Structure formats: structure tokens, C-alpha cells
Amino acid sequence: MTSTEVTTESEDSEPSSYAAARLRLLQEKAQSGPPRRAALASLTDDWLTALFTAAAEQTGVRGAALVAVGGYGRGELSPRSDLDLLLLHDGNADAGAIASLADHIWYPVWDLGLALDHSVRTPAEARKTAGEDLKVQLGLLDARPVAGDLGLVAALRTTVLADWRNQAPKRLPALDELCRERAERQGELQFLLEPDLKEARGGLRDATALRAVAASWVADAPREGLAEARRALLDARDALHLTTGRATDRLALQEQDQVATALGLLDADALLRQVYEAARTVSYATDVTWREVGRVLRSRSTRPRLRAMLGGGKAASPERTPLSEGVVEADGEVVLARSARPERDPVLVLRAAAAAAQSELPLSRHVVRHLATAARPLPVPWPAEAREELVTLLGAGEATVPVWEALEAEGLITRLLPDWERVHCRPQRNPVHTWTVDRHLVEAAVRASSLTRRVGRPDLLLVAALLHDIGKGWPGDHSVAGEVIARDMAARIGFDQHDVGVIATLVRHHLLLIETATRRDLDDPATVRSVATAVGTTSTLELLHALTEADALATGPAAWSTWRASLVADLVERVATVLAGQAPEEPEPAAPSAEQERLAIEALRTGEPVLALHAQAQTPNEDGEPEPVGVELLIALPDRPGVLPAAAGVLALHRLTVRAADLRAVELPAELGEGRSADLLLLSWRVAAEYGSLPQATRLRADLVRALDGSLDIRARLAEREAAYPRRRGVKAPPPRVTVAAAGSQLATVIEVRAQDAPGLLHRIGRALEQCEVRVRSAHVSTLGANAVDAFYVTDTDGEPLPEVRAAEVAREVEKTLG
């Protein structure tokens, strides 16, 4: 064959012909997205096939093939994508001929200015290189023949896939580490103002890694929404390439409006929100997939040992450890108990989420999906248990974030809090902000969780932190809009009118302290008075101070400093002085209810404890069915030392969680006590079973009698039960804080305890007070999510308030016991 004939046959391989067709394709407005990427790959295939065919004829090489790998192998060719090509040959041809074949292909590509990633290898060399270089192996997983010996390519693909599956226990952890290192360098795509669509966490590299994991047959990524997310990221990259004319993956600020226009979106914010949504889907799928990979690989490594231990029998099923009512831990994940009924238990979603966060365990994806489809909606307003579980979830610190993201991935957050949709994935253009609006709100709650010991109402602090920027999804001043929305959301969550007002005030004025402290003259009395007027009370000021710090810390490193903290603290001290101008009046003790009076008379008559355990008043839910508010336990008994730790210990032994409690010493008139008068103790508890059913009142009474007479060693029993269960990891809570309330009461000394709620906590506090030889005149116990906020009115043995030095000693001893 003459050279003239070769030129005629390879006319389609002319670079100018391919370049013109390529340009026409990229300029077609009607064709974009996957069709254009596929068409561009097909057009490039045809051109390279012609180049390869002509070159093979000229060089006389047989037993060779041109292979597309990487993105080109997947047929996802963006306008400025590299061409990843492998020239595969069987090794029989002369080295010079192979080099000449390669030159006939590579040089036309370079002449057009296209980026080229190329290699020339035999199947054995390709396999060896893949075994040594993880990135090469990943590229070959997407190998696709373009031209030449198809059998050669098919054999290589089969070998590479087999190697990948056989080496999965070693290769997958290495790939996981590679992804983590890249994420550390590039950041999280879903929060970056100028994200790298390919390299950042949640970008195209991670989507490709998920394909590789699926090819290993070890685990498969959640497929819901993943293909759409990859398409959104690829479409954004295509538009970016066409807008800039460069092979870039970084979505710079100055190009976002043009890219948005090219994609038919309203503006740059709409573009970022779409990109963030896609990245969040990929990131969640990545988390779930790598967790499943770890579980499977651990299972494979332990199975032989288990079989040996069991004599070759069937491996034992994973242990299921109860975490909460209807929630258990199994194989390192939080799943539902076999008896759980989501369709009958609307609080189960929040209970499972709170248990997962408190235990620092992931929520099983299958559980989250099941809850999303089967769980009943919560009644509005929420029952008390739902509100407490939300507060527990928010107070878990860093462990809150992955649990919240799992709920959000299945739409459960917007179902619980519909107004959340406005801030979901909403970008913040201020470079001071690290996060999107929704993630910033969750981060603020995370920061607030470490400040809960500073406030008397940690539940209000945590919820206000979650809602403080909720108005950013609406026009106008976000603080003003947020106040209205927060008021509605707080009422929905089930707070009473007073607490709703406090949360609304915190949201409305969440910038007041930082703006006043840094922009106003604090020596001007009018400045301090204006803040005092806006805040209203010292308790609200306390909350606002903590919220200000949490908000700033969650914004970014530039938003908070020692200097700013000192200015805010100075302002708070001045405002507190103004608000403390009038001391609170001593509250009148509430009279015993008829039920309490009846029990007290019976206790006085018998000289022994008397109990009543019953459900509190019920309210109808959305379906008109009764919804239990809680379980009330009333105890009346003659006043004597050790009552508080004994009663609290008995409840802990029976796995009853104390949500609220009130202990009061009362004296019945002689006419009510059959002519006898005596000091009695009335204990009113609101309790809930950790899991399982409630115990019978008769059993509680019998154990209380034994605890009081010393035949039941509660401390030892609680220690035995704790030792019987393996210690589960959990969130690291702030240390307990025990203080003496200034001017708390004229009749007693008020010891305030703020600590992480835990089984037996109230028993330990009661024992510590008994050992300090003080008398508990009354106690007021509140469990707000995972936080216990308790006040104990104590006196000396003569019934007098403790001297200042003695009170401080008691507080230190109690704190030491709890620490």
C-alpha cells in the first residue's frame, strides 16, 4: 500500500477535522450534561481509532490496543478533561515499532493542545504497576477499549478486577487513607466558598472511590441520589471549563455567576447550594460505605478465630446492648430493638439519634431509612420526652454532627423542623464563616454543649444555639425574622410560653453583646442600661453570654479572641449589676396536693414509706388518641437521714431515669394526722424507664424499706451492675460544677449542681450531702436532655443556713465526689 493510499484512508484522523467537530459540539447550547460528555467521548474515540488504525498499518504492529482509562474510560469527558490513554501491547513487536506507534498517536493529541496522560505497557507490566501504584490500579478499573485487540483489553480487565478483589483487605484501607489525606488538604466541598469540584471531600474523586469499593464486592455505596449528585458535579465542572476555557476544577468566586447562568440557575448562591447538596450526598455515601467496609473486613478477620473457638460451628451473632427504649447497639452501630415499633412510637427517631450521639456510635443507614418511611409524625406541640431527646442530641458535642447529618440525609430533620429547609445547604458569603448556615447552627450547638455548666437552663441554651441564625433563609434582618421563626419552632418543640419567650429573646439579640462590647462605650451608663432592658433578667443574660461565645466559636477562628471575650465579659458583669438592683422575693412554699396529703397521712399512720406510681394526665395526639405525658412517682415517709440517696438509689437500681424531682419537708397539722404531728418528707418524681416496662410500686416500696433499714446495699448493687456491662464509649461531657447560690434563700443554703445526667447521679449527690452532715430541707431536680440541673436547700443539724465558709466546703466535697 502506498503512502498516498494511507493518507486517503486516514483522512478522518486529521486533527483539524476532529478539532472542528469538537468545537461545534461544545458550542451546541441544546446539548449538555451526560449526552454531551458521551458524545465528546464518542467523537474522541472515532478520532483516536482512526489515528491508531493508520499508525498500526504504518508501523506493522499487531497485538496492540488503545485503552481509555480513568474518566475517559467511564465516558465522562468534560470539555477540558485530560485524555487518559494506555497503549497496551502483547510484547511481541519490536520496541522501536511500539515507540513509533505511540508517537503517531501522542503527537497529534499534543498538537491540538489537549492534555494527555499516557503510558505504554504489556499486560504483565500494567498488572505489576497496578500492584505497586494504587492510583494506576484505580484507573485500570475503568479501562475501556478504544481500538485494536479487544481480547487483549478484556484479559487485562479481568486480571485487574480479580487482583483488586483478592487484594481488597489491603487495598481498601489504603484507598480510605488516601481519601482522608486528600480531604485534609482540600477541605469539605459542601462548606467551601471556592470548592474544588474534584479533589475536595464529597467531590468527584470520592464518587470514583465509591465505584472502586463497589467493584471490590466488599461493600456497595447507598445508591439513592448518588448518580444525580455525580451528574450535578460533572455538569458544574463542564460549565466551569466552558466559562473559563481552562482545565480547572476550582469554582472561583469571580466565575460562579457565569457558571450559574450557563447551568440555567438563578445566581451564584443557587449554584453553590446545588453543588453543596450534591457534595453532601457523596459525603454521606462515603461515610456509610467506608464504615461498612471496616465492618466487613473486621468480620472477615475475626471469623476464622471465632470458628476455631466454636469448634468449627456457626459464628455467634453480634451482641445487642440496650441503649434506650427500643434502641440497641449491634456490631458497632445503633439499630432498633426487635420489639421497637416506629409506627406506634413517634419519639423513636429522636430517641435513637440521642442514644447514638451520647454513645458516639453511628446510626445504621438501614435504621435511618426505615425510620424515614415508617415513623409516625410527632404531635404538635411535641411531648416532653421528644423535647428532652432533642436536647440530649444537641448536647452530645462533636458526636452530634454525624448523627444529625444521617437524619438530614433522609429528610428527617426537615420533617421534624420544617423551617430548617430554608437554611439547608445555604451558603454564607462572609469569608469569616467556615460553614453553611445549617452546619453553622449545628456547630453552634456543639460549642454550646461545652458551656452548659455555666447556665441554669442548658436546654434553652442548646435550642437557642440551634435556632439563632434560622432567619437567614428569609429577607431582611435575620435576627428580626429569626425571632418570629424561633418563637414558632420553640412552641412546636413543646416549650411553655415563658421558655418560648426566652428563646425568642436570645435569637433576636444573639449579636447584641458582641456588637455592643466592640462598638460602644461601656463606661456610658445608657449603653449598659439599654442592654439590660433588652435582656430583661439575669438568667437570660447568662444564657446570652454563653450563646454569644458558642456562636463566635462556631463561626470561625477569626470571630473570637481573648480580647473579644474580655470585652463581652466586662459588659455582662456591668449589665448583671444593673439587673441585680432588686433582690428576688422568697417564694411561698406550695401547699401539698390532695394526693400528696393522702399519702402523707398514711405514712404518718404507718411510720413507713407510702408510694403511688401512675401516668400523668394525657393529651390527645394528631389522631385524637391519648398521648402519655410522663409517669409520676409520689413517695411520702417520715423524715429521717438518708432518705434522698436511698430513694434515688432504688430508682437507679430499677433503671428509672429521673426527669424532674421535688423533695420537701412538711409538717402535717395534728387534725390531719389523727391527733399526731410529725415532720414528713414528700418526694414527687417524674420518671421514665431506660428501656423495658415500669416496675411495680410494691417492688419499689419493698426495696426502699430495705435501703432505709440497711439490708439493701445500694452502692454495692449499682457497682456490681456497672461492672457486669462492658464500658461503652460515650461523649466527653464538661466536668460537673457545684456552686453555692448567692442570696438563694433566707431559710437555707442553696447548693446548685450542674452535671451530666447518669444512672445513680442523684444517689451519689445525696450520699455526698449526707457525708457532709447537712440536712436536705428541699430539693428541686431537673434533667434537661443529658444535663442535670439540681438545687438542694440544705441546713445544718439545727435547721439553720450554713455559714459561708462551711457552704463552700460542702460544695467542694460534692463536686469532688461527682468528679
Image (cartoon, helix red, strand yellow):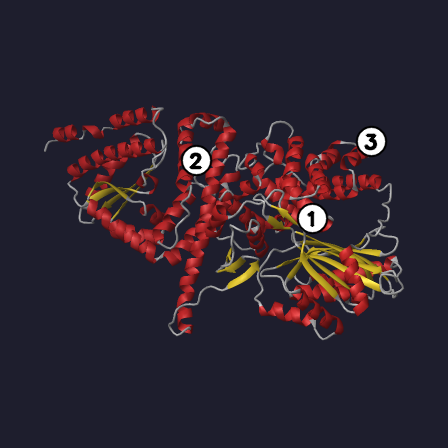
Labels 3 and 1: the sequence-earlier one: 1
Q: Earlier in the sequence, mark 2 or mark 1?
A: 2
Does residue 627 sit above or below 486 in this rendering?
below
Question: In x, y percent, where is residue 356?
Answer: 55, 54
- For disc 2, the neighbor class at 10 Å (few under 14, some 14 to 19, many from 20) is many
Nearer mark to the viewer, of 3 and 2: 3
Q: Which residue sits furthest left? A: 1
Which labelled disc corresponds to residue 65? Answer: none
Provide the secondary structure element on which disc 1 rests. Answer: helix
Give the mark, 3 or 2, whose residue is nearer the N terminus: 2
Residue position marked by numbered label 2 in the rendering: 249
Instruction: Give the CA separation, mark 3 to mark 1.
Output: 30 Å
Query: Quick one: 743 or 2, which is closer to the camera?
Result: 743
Give residue 651's quadrant in the image.
bottom right
As shown in the figure, which amino acid type bears the numbered disc 3? Ala
Residue 551's spot in the image, x, y percent? 65, 40
Q: Which residue is mark 1?
A: 458
- Disc 2 marks which amino acid? Asp
Label total for image: 3
Q: Residues within 10 Å of mark 1 (few under 14, many from 20)?
A: many
Which residue, given by chain and number where applicable, does mark 3 sit on?
A: 526
Instruction: Point out residue 227 in the picture as x, y percentages from the top left corner.
Output: 39, 40
Report whether 399 appears left or right of 606: left
Amino acid tagged 1: Pro
For label 3, the SS is helix
